[in-house]
Image (tube, rainbow, N blue to C red):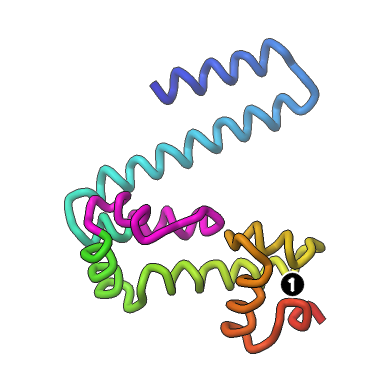
């Protein structure tokens, strides 16, 4: 089913030959490879609790900007939120929420360093609903406010 949809998209792009169609085809193929990889990981990982938790962590780290909740993370693993949290901490030595925050802070640090985006845009890109919480967590994590970090 996935391959059939990809072929349809590619055929459509080839038929229309709009500006940048080759780049669009590259993106379509890249998305397919990523989806196949994720599916393979999930199928392989289902056999063990550690594998299931690792697969969820990879999903979270690939998309830290999503509005992750403990419940949504746990649903991906097939465990209850409390069981998921306990297994996650046992495997990685950190709670899922703390690990997500760490990932978001590292992403924010890189974006502040290497992009020209505003602090509020970076906050949104890193999954924070408000600049207030982003600044609060950034300062707690790095010891300085985001605006000071840029300088």
Q: Nearer the viewer, residue 139 or 39?
A: 139
Q: Residue 11 location in percent, x, y? A: 60, 14
- Looking at the image, residue 18 lies above or below residue 46: above
Q: Which image quadrant for residue 84?
A: bottom left
Q: Residue at x 28, y 53 (%)?
A: 77
Q: Residue at x 72, y 24 (%)?
A: 21
* Residue 60 lies within the magenta run: yes
Q: Residue 103 location in percent, x, y? A: 52, 68
- Looking at the image, residue 96 lies above or below residue 11: below
Q: Nearer the viewer, residue 85 or 15?
A: 85
Q: Residues within 10 Å of mark 1 (few under 14, many from 20)?
A: few
Q: Which residues are magenta?
A: 55-80
Q: Residue 75 location in percent, x, y? A: 30, 50
Q: Tag 1's secondary structure? A: helix
* Residue 69 lies within the magenta run: yes
Q: Residue furthest bottom?
A: 143
- Looking at the image, residue 127 lies above or below residue 24: below
Q: Nearer the viewer, residue 57 or 67?
A: 67
Main secondary structure of the magenta stretch: helix
Q: Which image quadrant for residue 55?
A: bottom left
Q: Quadrant of the C terminus?
A: bottom right
Q: Quadrant of the N terminus?
A: top left
Q: Residue at x 25, y 74 (%)?
A: 90
Q: Residue furthest left?
A: 47
Q: Which image quadrant for residue 24?
A: top right
Residue to which mark 1 is pinned: 113
Q: Residue at x 30, y 56 (%)?
A: 74
């Amino acid at each position: 089913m996935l391959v059939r949809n990809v072929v349809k998209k590619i055929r459509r792009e080839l038929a229309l030959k709009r500006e940048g169609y080759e780049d669009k085809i590259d993106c379509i193929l890249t998305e397919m490879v990523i989806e196949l990889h994720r599916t393979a990981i999930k199928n392989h990982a289902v056999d063990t609790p550690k594998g299931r938790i690792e697969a969820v962590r990879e999903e979270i780290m690939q998309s830290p900007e999503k509005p992750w909740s403990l419940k949504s993370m746990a649903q991906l693993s097939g465990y209850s939120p409390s069981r998921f949290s306990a297994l996650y901490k046992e495997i990685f030595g950190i709670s899922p929420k703390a690990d997500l925050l760490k990932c978001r802070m590292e992403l924010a640090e890189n974006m502040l360093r290497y992009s020209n985006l505003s602090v509020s845009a970076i906050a949104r890109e890193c999954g924070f609903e408000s600049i207030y919480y982003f600044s609060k967590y950034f300062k707690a994590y790095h010891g300085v406010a985001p605006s000071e970090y840029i300088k």
